[in-house]
Image (tube, helix red, strand yellow):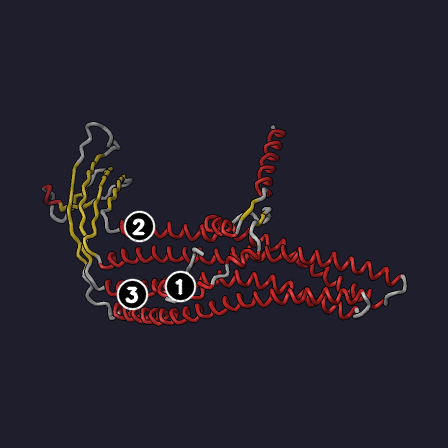
Amino acid sequence: MRNKLIILFSLCLNVAVFAQETPVAFSLQEAIDYALIHNRTVKNAARDIEIAEEQKWETTATGLPQISANVDYQNWIKQQVSLLPGEIAGGPAGTFIPVEFSPKQNIGAMATLNQLLFDGSYIVGLQAAKVYLEISENSKVKTDLEVRKAVINAYGNVLLTEESLQILESNKAILESNLDEIQKTFENGLEEEESVEQIKITLSGLISDLNNVKRLNVLSYQMLNITLGIDLNTDTTLTDDLEVLALQYTSLEALAADESVENTIDYRIAENDVETKDLFVKLAMSDGMPTLSAFVNGGYSAFGEDFGFFNNNQKWYGSSMFGVNLSIPIFSSLGRSAATQQARIDLEIANENLIDTEQQLKFQIATAKSEYQYAIEDYSNKKENLELAERIERKNETKFFEGISSSFDLRQAQTQLYSAQQEYLQSMLDIINKKAELDAILSNLNN
């Protein structure tokens, strides 16, 4: 039996490991679509909507008929005695006769129907439940926008490290070839030792950068997996290309997008806050209104000296009652007035915050457009700089091996090229990220 359990456990473990290590491939859009379903924050936001829907019904149900039932059983261990004047039974005046009025055991069953007829707080509660659901739905939209932006950033960072690795590996191979050639020339006495040392310095720095990017590459994949909502160590493959994505995310139409803030999710959330504070004012005012409710009940009771309530000859006595309750608040020592004033002040604060949110959003949209436009312009600039840096590096390499320029000039040209390569990659990533940031502010989930 023990061996069977060990085999079963091993099979389950292998299945779990296989599931974690099964490679998955995503384009950027596929990654976004996947995360909007499987990201843990997104799933919790969806659960918040479900909670709000249940809360809405819970609030509605408090104004609907409520039925309750109870069963009450009593057994006098020592029955209570009442004293009657002795004159009733013909006894002398001033004497008393002990009497046990109730049977030793009794049982009663009662069902009650309660119905709320009018309550100001209930009406406000219904409105609040609707607003709470809207808040949860807006929060879900906000979460989706943030997750979308996070996926784009994480996906772009992976592509950046992948491109950097390829460039650094290529540069390393070229430098190692140059170093080998210069080393041989130096050994033959045709080159100075400084030239060898300059190349070694450049190569050492390049290897250090390469090792760092390798570590960053692993971390960037893990960050992407977390954002997607999959296991940290899943073997993820990206099918999109950084430069292609940068071109896809270059859109001058986005710079002409409508700057109306009323349709943005942040503005709608601020509006929800105003609605909530307004409901608090109504709730505080409703405390001064009367409450009207009604009930009807019915039940049966039985009595006996012994527990024989389930016998066929046991006699049961029915009862029923209808009633109405009207509660009218009269004076609260100005407590309700103070609560209402507090709620009104909170409403004023919410209105001020709404105006501030509107102004901040207009500024954020203008800033995001400016940064996005700069990213597009910077990409063109960095592309031209890279082409120039490549030509300069090739010329200096040719001059160096022809003995026209020094190793210092070559190293300077190589360093300038490596910097231009990284700036070019970063400029492509900036276009993608700045476009994602603009879309998030404009509440655009479609682009």
In this picture, is 394 found above or below 7? below
Badge 1 element: helix
Q: Position of residue 152 (x, y in %)?
A: 52, 56
Badge 2 element: helix
Instruction: State the mark number for residue 58.
Output: 2
Q: Which residue is mark 1?
A: 266
Q: Which of these two is toward me, 36 or 321?
A: 36
**Crowdedness of circle 3 by 10 Å Cα count: few (<14), some, many (20+)?**
some
Q: Which of these two is toward me, 236 or 357?
A: 236
Q: Position of residue 310 (x, y in %)?
A: 24, 30
Residue at 57%, 56% (x, y): give it. Answer: 242
Q: Position of residue 37 (x, y in %)?
A: 46, 48
Q: Name which residue type carries label 3.
A: Asp
Q: Position of residue 161 (x, y in %)?
A: 62, 57
Q: Which residue is mark 3?
A: 278
Indicate which disc, 3 or 2, sits on the residue closer to the N terminus.
Answer: 2
Marks 3 and 2, Cα distance to the nearest angstrom?
22 Å
Mark 1, mark 2: which one is toward the viewer?
1
Q: Which quarter of the figure is the C terminus placed in? A: bottom left
In this picture, is 336 found above or below 24? below
Indicate which disc, 3 or 1, sits on the residue closer to the N terminus.
Answer: 1
Quarter residue 245 falls in = bottom right
Marks 3 and 1, Cα distance to the nearest angstrom?
19 Å
Marks 1 and 2, Cα distance to the nearest angstrom?
28 Å
Instruction: State the mark number for residue 328.
Output: none
Badge 3 element: helix
Quarter residue 137 falls in = bottom left
Q: Which of these two is toward me, 366 or 95?
A: 366
Do the residues bearing badges 3 and 2 touch, measured as CB atoms within 8 Å?
Answer: no
Residue at 84%, 61% (x, y): give it. Answer: 183
